[in-house]
Image: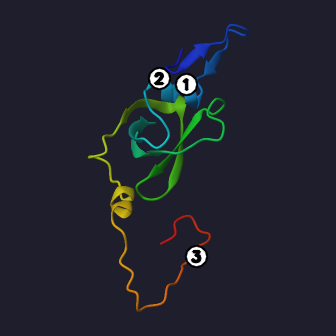
Amino acid sequence: MLEGQFLSRASMVPTMVSLSEFLSKHGLSTGDRVRAEWKGMHVEGIILPSPHPEKSSTMNVKMSSGYNTGLGLDHISSIQKVPHAEGHSTHAAATNSAPHHPSTKPGFSIVGVGGTIVS
């Protein structure tokens, strides 16, 4: 039997573990930065929310490149949480400093729509 599988009592057929069970087993949650080995490749990113974690067998991760990828739980051979000091968090730096708005200039807004990565 493959790691991450269990036998269903009703059918005695191997059944994949759900995302919610996988995260709980490894002490992880949505928003955690993780480093995983998946199909022999090293993947690092932030765990994204899933609409149905109790039914999903895929973990979605936002990588530092800005792209999202789905990792099949049955192909993850190792996973660990990356401490915040090691991670590349731009969110903390962006939220800790307030922008300076000179009172002599008019305000403006920028609206960005569409695209995989908005620059």
Please tell me whether mark 3 or mark 2 is closer to you in this view: 3
User: What is the number of the mark on residue 111?
Assistant: 3
The residue where tag 1 is placed is 21
The residue at the point 57 percent across, 31 percent down is 19
CA neighbours of label 3 inside 10 A, class few (<14), some (14 to 19), many (20+)? few
Most distant residue in the front direction:
103
Most distant residue in the bottom direction:
104
Q: Quadrant of residue 112?
A: bottom right
Name the kind of residue labelled 1 in the image.
Glu
User: Label 2's element?
Assistant: helix
Disc 2 versus disc 1: distance between alpha carbons?
A: 6 Å
The residue where tag 2 is placed is 25
Q: Is residue 80 left or right of residue 55?
A: left
Name the kind of residue labelled 3 in the image.
Val
Foreground: 54 or 77? 54
Name the kind of residue labelled 2 in the image.
Lys
